[in-house]
Image (tube, grey):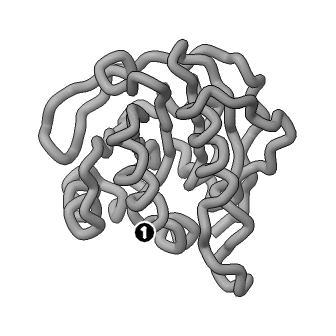
Amino acid sequence: MTRTTSNTVALGTLAPNFNLKNTNSSEWFSFQDLKGEKGTLVIFICNHCPFVHHVIDEIVMIANDYRVQGIGIITISSNDVVKFPQDAPELMTEFAFQNKFEFPYLYDETQEVAKAYNAACTPDFYLYDNQDKLVYHGQLDDSRPGNGIPLSGNDLRGAIDSVTYNRTINPDQKPSLGCNIKWK
C-alpha cells in the first residue's frame, strides 16, 4: 500500500466524458448519461484498498443522501486487474452488491478515464456543478485508517451542500489520501 495524495486539478475544469461498462448491470454509460441535475460526484475507488474500505459506508450514505437531491453519483475503478485480480470486474459487481451500491460502479479497463481526470489515488473525489465544472477535488474528511478520527464526510458533504444550495465553495481544499492507482 503506497500512501498517495490526489493530484492538483484546476477548479473550473470541465468533466472529461467517457463511455464505460457498469459492472452492476453490464450497460455502458457516459458522464452525460449519469450526471445529476444539480451536480455530479465522480469517485475513483477499487475493491481492495484499505482507505476505500475505511470510507465505503460513508460514501454509500452520501450517495443515498444526495442522489435524491439531484446529485449524480459515479464510481470508477481503474486498477490493473492483471497485477491486482481482486479488482476484476466480476469482483467489482460483488463488492457493489455487498456494499449496497445503488449507483454505477464503472470499469476503466484502459485507464484512459483515470488519466483524463488526472486521478492518482483511491478514493479520489471530483465534484462537478450543474455545468460540469469542477468545484471540489479534495478529501472526504480527516479520518484515515488507524488515526482514530471518526468518519463524518464533513469536507465532501459541505461541498455537495454548497452545490445543492448554490453557495460558494471554499477553494482551499485538502487533497484526498489513499492507495495509488495501480497503473499498467
Check the image and report above or below for 145 versus 142. below
Residue 27, given in percent of the width and then of the height, sits at: 15, 31
Check the image and report above or below for 21 versus 142. above
Residue named by callout 1: 57
Q: In which quarter of the view is residue 74 placed?
A: top left
Residue 169 appears left or right of 108: right
Whether residue 38 is visible, yes or no, is: yes
Of the pair 112 and 129, the residue shown nearer to us: 129
Of the pair 39 and 57, the residue shown nearer to us: 39
Of the pair 16 and 12, the residue shown nearer to us: 12
Disc 1 element: helix
Residues packed near mark 1 inside 10 Å, few (<14), some (14 to 19) or many (20 plus):
some
Check the image and report above or below for 82 versus 132. below
Residue sitting at 71 percent across and 80 percent down? 149
Residue 44, given in percent of the width and then of the height, sits at: 50, 45
Residue 85, given in percent of the width and then of the height, sits at: 34, 60
Q: In which quarter of the view is residue 13 placed?
A: top right
Residue sitting at 57 percent across and 41 percent down? 160
Amino acid on which the number 1 mark rests in the picture: Asp
Residue sitting at 69 percent across and 30 percent down? 167
Residue 4 appears left or right of 113: right
Whether residue 81 is visible, yes or no, is: no
Residue sitting at 30 percent across and 28 percent down? 20
Residue 26, given in percent of the width and then of the height, sits at: 13, 37
Tell me the quarter of the image containing the N terminus. bottom right
